[in-house]
Image: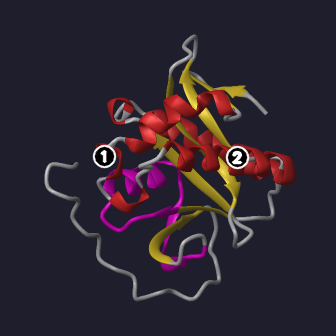
Amino acid sequence: MELRTERLELRHPLPEDCDQLFTMFNDPQGWVYEPEGRHLERSVTEGFIARAAARWLNDGLSYWTVRLIGSDQIIGIGGAQRHSSGHWNLSYRLGTEQQGHGYAVELGRAGMAAAQQADPEVAVIAWIHETNLPSQRVAERLGLSFQGVFIDQNDGKPRMAFTDRPLNLTPAEPKPARLAAPEGIV
């Protein structure tokens, strides 16, 4: 499934996208909130692309590469893919120079719509690091509600869960007060 939004072209990730995606995934500024997630080797990005391709085959939906309409430059990756919990995981990762233009909301809306079309009975969840205030604001603009802090089953880390419907999950810890972003991040 490829589609266009008002400003974005969303395509399946392909092996030939690896160089551009690795540049984005390797950028330290893109990993301020979870530096351990940064791709230090191209093989990690290759694996990411392969897993996304497999999910397209198995679930009929996964992450898209994001380009501005009329451009071949990848500016991000995201959308919705099936999480190990069975829920849809909503992601909206953009290159640092593309942040702050509303592209994450546009990508998030497309991902939510695709997930709801593919399997409307399944909740959409955005798993967000507690200090990532920009991502929290995107989730809220998408109409997602903060449900609490839960263990993200993909990696076992506690994260804030923003969802499109109430969930019956056991919190990892009490709901936190909103934490401040790292210095210099708005």
Label 1 with label 2: CB-CB less than 8 Å:
no
- Image position of 126 (left or right of 57): left
Q: Quadrant of residue 96?
A: top left
**Residue 66 on the magenta segment:** no
Q: Which mark is residue 28?
A: 1
Q: Position of residue 183 (x, y in %)?
A: 14, 55
What's the residue at 63%, 50% (across, down)? 47
75, above or below 78, in the image: above
**Residue 128 on the magenta segment:** yes
What's the residue at 65%, 43% (across, down)? 49
What's the residue at 30%, 46% (across, down)? 28
Q: Position of residue 150 (x, y in %)?
A: 51, 79
Q: Amino acid at mark 2?
A: Ala
Q: Amino acid at mark 1?
A: Pro
Q: Residue furthest left?
A: 183
The residue stretch that appears in magenta? 127-153
Q: Quadrant of residue 5?
A: top right
Q: Report the front residue among 51 and 125.
A: 51
Within 10 Å of the Cα at label 2, are there few (<14), some (14-19), or many (20+) other Cα atoms? some
Within 10 Å of the Cα at label 1, are there few (<14), some (14-19), or many (20+) other Cα atoms? some
Q: Earlier in the sequence, mark 1 or mark 2?
A: 1
- Image position of 170 (left or right of 14): left
Q: Secondary structure at mark 2?
A: helix
Please give the residue where the numbered disc 2 appears in the rendered image.
50
- Image position of 175 (left or right of 139): left
Measure the alpha-carbon separation of dots 1 and 2: 23 Å
User: Is residue 139 in sight in this rendering?
Assistant: yes
